[in-house]
Image (tube, rainbow, N blue to C red):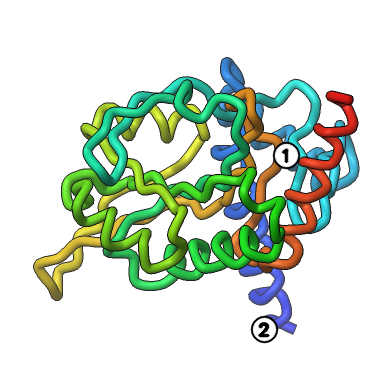
């Protein structure tokens, strides 16, 4: 019986921790972390406004805004802002080139999803924004992103520029020093963002999303946007 109680406690702690991380990523401007956490708990247990599933992604609830202006540098050293992507769709991920596991997995998923879209994939730009500008120079990013997709862009900048971009998308990240080695790791949230032509996030993809589900969600969003424009 004691073992069952302990297991339930561990599951509850994991559930609350995951909800807290999700609240951090998806809270709206002006919403405190406590308010966001309470709201996501309400969604979890059936109260409040539901997020709309979108074939592998999660469409943001009405009134929730992610994304917006940023000023960064691409892998060629060229300064870019959100205006350079005006009218384009993005599959955007925040990670870093020294990441040992989750970043390569997610970037591979993005690349496979873009290819799975066929000709429609030409409308989607795969992008990685580094959360480790200290090591991720434009040259480092150029070599790294080219391994995943020929059209993938890598963006970096000053620590302040990266922090501002991450804040716009409610991305958590922090340096983690390893006592057993000289190199450090970066702890970070791991969502993929589908960004619309207006620079706002249309859908989120959790780390376990597969390329087929991601492609289906992107296709649905692009089809919906095309129908609305016609």
Where, by quadrant of the figure, is residue 163 drawn?
top left
Q: How far apart are marks 1 and 2 (CA)?
A: 29 Å
Q: Which of marks 1 and 2 is nearer the N terminus?
A: 2
Circle 1 residue: 40
User: Which element carries disc 2, helix, strand or loop?
Assistant: helix
Against 201, is 30 above or below?
above
* Residue 13 visible in the displayed image: no
Name which residue lies at 60% across and 34% down.
Answer: 88
Q: Closest to the observer: 187 or 202?
A: 202
Q: Which residue lies furthest to the top in this view?
A: 30
Against 22, is 48 above or below?
above
Tell me the quadrant of the picture where the N terminus can be found.
Answer: bottom right
Q: Closest to the observer: 32 or 161?
A: 161
Residue 136: percent from left, percent from top:
22, 51
Residue 14: percent from left, percent from top:
61, 62
Residue 80: percent from left, percent from top:
35, 28
Name which residue lies at 37% across and 68% down.
Answer: 147
The residue carrying pointer 1 sits among few (fewer than 14), some (14 to 19) or many (20 or more) residues within 10 Å by Cα, namely: many
The residue carrying pointer 2 sits among few (fewer than 14), some (14 to 19) or many (20 or more) residues within 10 Å by Cα, namely: few
Name which residue lies at 20% across and 60% down.
Answer: 177
Q: Residue 3 carries which label?
A: 2
Against 153, is 149 above or below?
below
* Drawn side of residue 124 relative to residue 153, left or right: right
* Residue 47 visible in the displayed image: yes
* Drawn side of residue 36 relative to residue 54, left or right: left
């Amino acid at each position: 019986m004691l073992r069952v109680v302990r297991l339930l406690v561990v599951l509850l702690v994991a559930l609350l921790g995951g909800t807290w991380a999700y609240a951090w990523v998806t809270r709206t401007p002006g919403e405190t972390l406590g308010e966001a956490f309470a709201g996501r708990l309400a969604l979890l247990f059936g109260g409040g406004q539901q997020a709309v599933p979108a074939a592998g992604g999660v469409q943001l609830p009405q009134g929730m805004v992610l994304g917006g202006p940023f000023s960064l540098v691409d892998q060629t050293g060229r300064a870019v802002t959100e205006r350079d992507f005006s009218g384009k769709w993005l599959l955007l991920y925040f990670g870093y080139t020294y990441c040992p596991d989750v970043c390569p997995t997610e970037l591979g998923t993005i690349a496979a999803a873009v290819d799975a879209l066929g000709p429609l994939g030409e409308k989607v730009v795969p992008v990685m924004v580094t959360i480790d500008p200290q090591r991720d120079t434009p040259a480092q990013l150029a070599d790294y992103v080219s391994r995943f997709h020929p059209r993938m862009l890598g963006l970096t900048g000053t620590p302040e520029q990266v922090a501002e971009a991450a804040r716009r998308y409610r991305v958590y990240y922090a340096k983690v020093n390893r006592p057993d080695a000289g190199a450090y790791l970066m702890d970070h949230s791991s969502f993929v963002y589908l960004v619309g032509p207006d620079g706002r996030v249309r859908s989120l993809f959790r780390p376990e999303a597969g390329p087929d589900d991601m492609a289906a969600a992107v296709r649905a969003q692009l089809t919906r946007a095309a129908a609305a424009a016609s």
